[in-house]
Amino acid sequence: MSMKRRTFLKGALASGAVAATAGLMPRLVFAEGAKAPAGFDAKTYDDALKAVSGGAEVTESPAIAIKVPDIAENGSVVPIQINAELPKIESIAILVEKNPVPLIANFKFAENGVGYISTRIKMGGTSNVVALVKSDGKYFSVKKEVKVTVGGCGG
Amino acid sequence: MSGMRVQAKVANGETEVKILMNHPMETGGRKDQKTNEVIPAHFITEVTCEHNGKVVLNSDWSGGISKNPYLSFKFKGGAAEESVKVTWKDNKGETETQEAKIKA
């Protein structure tokens, strides 16, 4: 546990300088009246992740499984299934690291929620797909790479 | 534009809801290949599901969900013949609601 936290902190420090300056931008955009929920106007993965998690610590968890194809021939329709075996599931967000809008969706559950989502997403190219799960007030994530033959954002 | 399909089935104390929506899900970042003009954004921004009048799922979406979206999720509880009601809203203010009875 302490080891995990240490490696996380190292990563956080490395990206901290960038995130701190970039973090101001979305807030300004929100203030101008667009009522987009947190993270949806973020243009980078780091900004989107930070907006959804509220800057809280995110721990990688083997209790979350992402089922996606290793290779997607058509990036405009990539099936994805997420299973999270964690207590008190509050939300599941799907992010694609290299998409122009990295945050795909954020699913928020009532107290009788189950850690399961199945849908179809667009991918602009080969990228990691990330599931960010809020469980009992804490954030956990897992990522998996999908190789995309034909991107789904250029049409 | 219309024609959302909702199915709900209860098994082992959990209800699984499956939803198919008809929607172009245009991100606003795509160009018409003939005219080279940007196709305006038109995508679902919010999907909610109620069970017996109580919200069990509330979700925010970007244009990153595929055209004619499919969504499946589960919640604890639910019984045969009870109702689930799914509503989507898009960035143009359009909305659609569909109800279904839970099957055993």
Image (cartoon, grey):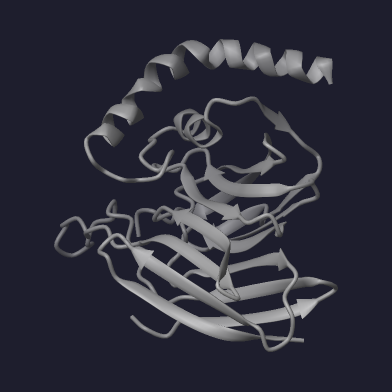
> Residue drawn 52% across and 30% down?
A54
Q: Position of residue A12 (x, y in %)?
A: 60, 16
Question: Does B104 sit left or right of B36 as displayed?
Answer: right
Quadrant of the image occupied by residue A62: top right
User: Which corner quadrant holds the N terminus of chain A?
Assistant: top right
Q: Position of residue B68 (x, y in %)?
A: 44, 72
User: Which corner quadrant holds the C terminus of chain A?
Assistant: bottom left
Question: From the viewer's perspective, is residue A27 above or below residue A107?
Answer: above
Task: Give the camera-side residue of A135 and B50.
Answer: B50
> Residue drawn 35% across and 62% down?
B43
> Residue drawn 81% across and 50% down?
A85
Task: Give the camera-side residue of B49 and A17.
Answer: B49
Question: From the viewer's perspective, is residue B104 above or below residue A42?
Answer: below
Task: Give the camera-side residue of B86 and A47.
Answer: B86
- Residue found at the far front of this picture: B53
Q: Position of residue A88 (x, y in %)?
A: 74, 47
Question: Does A139 sit left or right of B77 as displayed?
Answer: left
Q: Position of residue A63 (x, y in %)?
A: 81, 44
